[in-house]
Image (tube, rainbow, N blue to C red):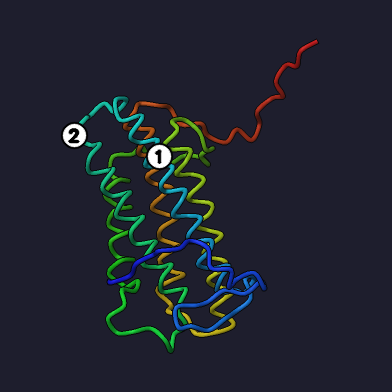
Amino acid sequence: MGLRITKVYTKTGDDGTTGLVGGQRVRKDNARIESYGTVDELMAHMGVARMHLAGESSRFTDAKAVAPFAELLEYMQNLLFTLGGELATRAEDIDPRMPTIRAEDVAFLERACDAYNEALPPLKDFVLPGGSHTSTALHVARTVARRAERHVIHLAAEEPVSPHCAVFLNRFSDALFVLCRWVNHAMQIPETTWRHKMPPPSLPG
């Protein structure tokens, strides 16, 4: 809690290694680095989605729905920071006081998924990303969440990782899919679904 960042670059990683929370040096292409690095990427995409939401909030048909939705995205982004810190620490170095992903966090994502899905029409076909900027950004985040999940599963095959981590990322991507649909619905933007028999469009000339 007393952390002070006084210098951004350290030059300690110029040899292609980086330090884990426990102090160990590992290669930057290590499975653990790939895992928490992808979670960091996901967290950045969540920030983009929050930025778009701020710019599109006037499009909501129910203005009262904006603030809770914005708070949810920020809360999910904070959970990702917790996950990144856990993945940056080997199991044997995790301090009991360190915040980690718990079964309760997975359960919260499931409740959020169910709550926002309640207002949506039944899904009759695959949804193509698009519509609002917010929804599209959340779709990108959803795909990164799936990639992060794959990296964590790969890491777990090499060394001990809490089983909650991969499950959390799986539910995170599920929740994002629902939120992608919900935010377009809240702005009354029709969904674009997969047309497997769509005829080719006309071309110029």
Please state which amino acid type lies under the numbered disc 2.
Lys
Q: Position of residue 82 (x, y in %)?
A: 36, 67
Give the camera-side residue of 28 and 166. 28
Position of 134 with respect to 63 (left or right) is right
Snapshot quadrant of residue 3: bottom left
The image quadrant where one finds the C terminus is top right
Q: Quick check: 4 above or below 126?
A: below
Real-space CA distance between mark 2 and mark 1, rounded to the nearest whole angstrom: 18 Å
Question: Residue at coordinates 47% horizontally, 48% vertically from top-left?
Answer: 45
Give the camera-side residue of 120 and 132. 132
Q: What kind of element bears circle 1?
A: helix
Position of 131 with respect to 3 (left or right) is right
Mark seen at residue 172:
none
Snapshot quadrant of residue 85: bottom left
Q: Residues within 10 Å of mark 1 (few under 14, many from 20)?
A: many
Q: Position of residue 50 (x, y in %)?
A: 37, 42
Residue sitting at the far top: 205
Please state which amino acid type lies under the numbered disc 1.
Arg
Q: What kind of element bears circle 2?
A: helix
Residue sitting at the far bottom: 92
Q: Residues within 10 Å of mark 2 (few under 14, many from 20)?
A: few
Identify the residue under disc 2. Answer: 64
Q: Quick check: 83 above or below 96?
A: above
Q: Position of residue 167 (x, y in %)?
A: 43, 69
Question: Residue at coordinates 53% horizontally, 79% vertically from top-left?
Answer: 156
Question: Residue at coordinates 56% horizontally, 76% vertically from top-left?
Answer: 155
Mark seen at residue 181:
1
Q: Position of residue 127 (x, y in %)?
A: 51, 39
